[in-house]
Amino acid sequence: MRRGAERAGCLGRSACGGSPCGSQARHGGQALRHLFVWLFSALLPLLAAAQSAGTPAPAHPPAKKKKSPAARRQLAPDPARIREIQQALAAKGFYQGEPSGKWDEPSVAAMKSFQESQGLPPSGKIEALGLQKLGLGSPVAGVAPPTPPGSGSASPKSDGPKKP
């Protein structure tokens, strides 16, 4: 450690060596310089050990990966779910033809008509409130956050007081 201190121009052993020497006054209050010298002298052996082990030393710690916007987006419904929505639209008289499982122009037009009839903005997109009104969505769609599977909000049924 003394070698790093000498390179920095410190004649004492304060921040670079351990015991107070008054070097702050001698160096004009360059405590930050002493800190860098100490850090460098502490990290140098670690870097050398990592390189001698055949493992390249990382230039900097790995940054936390941020979730991409695609990871947070909801996935598109599969053909079976689209067919189910088309069947519900047909049952209410909005979709004409055989359900195909593809969200095509007739499906968009049927959904727009249905949404308009329900007082919803007619976007033609598959949305939670529209599915709820079709009888295919969650009863709390757009009202409360979803609950994790298995943690249902229903309380267990009770037939009265339990006997020991």
Image: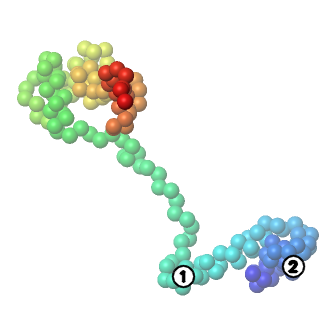
Per the image, the residue denoted by label 2 is 12
Per the image, the residue denoted by label 1 is 51
In depth, the one of 117 and 143 nearer the eye is: 143
Report the residue at 20% width, 24% height from top: 109
Query: Taking 104 as reference, is 122 left or right?
Result: right
Residue 143 lies in what quarter of the image?
Answer: top left
Residue 141 lies, in percent from the top left, at: 34, 26
Residue 34 lies in what quarter of the image?
Answer: bottom right
> Quarter of the image containing the N terminus?
bottom right
In depth, the one of 44 and 70 nearer the eye is: 44
The kind of residue tagged 1 is: Gln
- Element on which disc 2 rests: loop
Query: Taking 3 as reference, is 25 left or right?
Result: right
Report the residue at 75% width, 74% height from top: 37
Residue 124 lies, in percent from the top left, at: 26, 26
> Quarter of the image containing the C terminus?
top left
Query: Taking 158 as reference, is 57 left or right?
Result: right
Residue 127 lies in what quarter of the image?
Answer: top left
Residue 153 lies, in percent from the top left, at: 37, 28
